[in-house]
Image: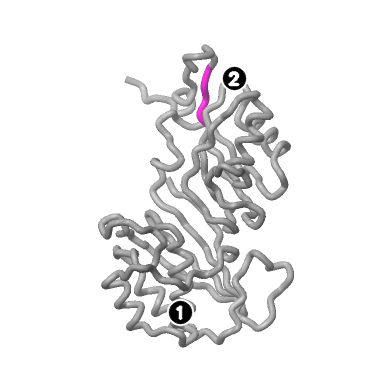
Amino acid sequence: MPAKDPVREADRTDGRSGKRRTRLKLTIAYDGSAFKGWQSQPFGATVQDVIEEALKRISGRRIVVHGAGRTDTGVHAIGQCAHIDVSGPLPAAEWQRILNFNLPETIRIMRCQKVSQSFHAQHSARGKIYRYFIRNQNVGLPLEANRVWLVPDMLDPALLRRTAGMFVGCHDFGGFAANRSAPDRTVRTLNRIRIVRKGTLIALTFEGEGFLYRMVRMLTGAIVRVASGKDSLEEVERRLREPVRPNWNHAAPAAGLHLIKVTY
């Protein structure tokens, strides 16, 4: 049998309307400063709510946006992914254009493409990449407000790397997350933490199969506290080996965190 064309497979009939239904994958960038995170809430003001409102204006009906995962209040993204099911002959490029026209400048659809009906933004994801930005100096730059964490304390580069290295691999991260779950549900694998420093700007890139609630912010907080002499490597190692509840209280601010990419 010939191989199925994933684009053709994306087109299905909507049983209620009889119209062709197409699944679209959206790659989304947003400035999270003005939003209460990604996921829809009763009082709105989330990225998902704003996109769904734009879709309703365009289509005249509610279209649910299925995101790859949540981001907290104030967290930014350049590579969040989502999918939607739409009807009609409108091509993906036109959906991208019309959506961007109806969205505020703080949210942009960077890419829109047809995908198979088997694709799911969350369940098909194989991993995520987050990047956290730190400005290590006494005075912050105005253009970096709500984008970067200003850390005036001197940070030891060797301790930054040693602490980050402790988190790489498969661990129970229950002591470095806000999830209040059973231990077997807080195990995650961090494939890599890369640290790049350019002058006083430090970028920590976290690559993993999945992340717990506030996990990246809490790991960043732990790394900075050790590098600034406020905590010890031994304390971090102990919490990693024997997760303690209540959880680590020193989360880095949301503003420095950016979702870079969802991998499939």
SS type, badge 1: helix
How far is the residue under mark 2 from the one under mark 1? 52 Å
The disc, 2 or 1, on the residue closer to the chain's N-terminal end is 2
Q: Amino acid at mark 2?
A: Gly
Q: Position of residue 128 (x, y in %)?
A: 45, 54
Residue in the image at 43% along x and 35% along y: 119
Q: Which mark is residue 124?
A: none
Specify the principal SS of the magenta part: strand
Counting every numbered tag in the picture gives: 2
Q: Amino acid at mark 1?
A: Leu
Residue in the image at 30% along x and 59% along y: 187
Q: State which quadrant residue 50 falls in.
A: top right
Q: Which mark is residue 88?
A: 2
Q: Position of residue 238 (x, y in %)?
A: 29, 77
In the rendered view of the protein, which quadrant contains the N terminus? top left
Q: Position of residue 72 (x, y in %)?
A: 53, 56
72, above or below 199, in the image: above
**Which of 48 and 158 lies nearest the eye of the viewer?**
48
Q: Which residue is mark 1?
A: 160
- Left or right position of 113 against 60: left
- Residue 22 counted in the magenta span: yes
- Mark 1: give few (<14), some (14-19) or many (20+) Cα within 10 Å: many
Residues shaded magenta: 20-24
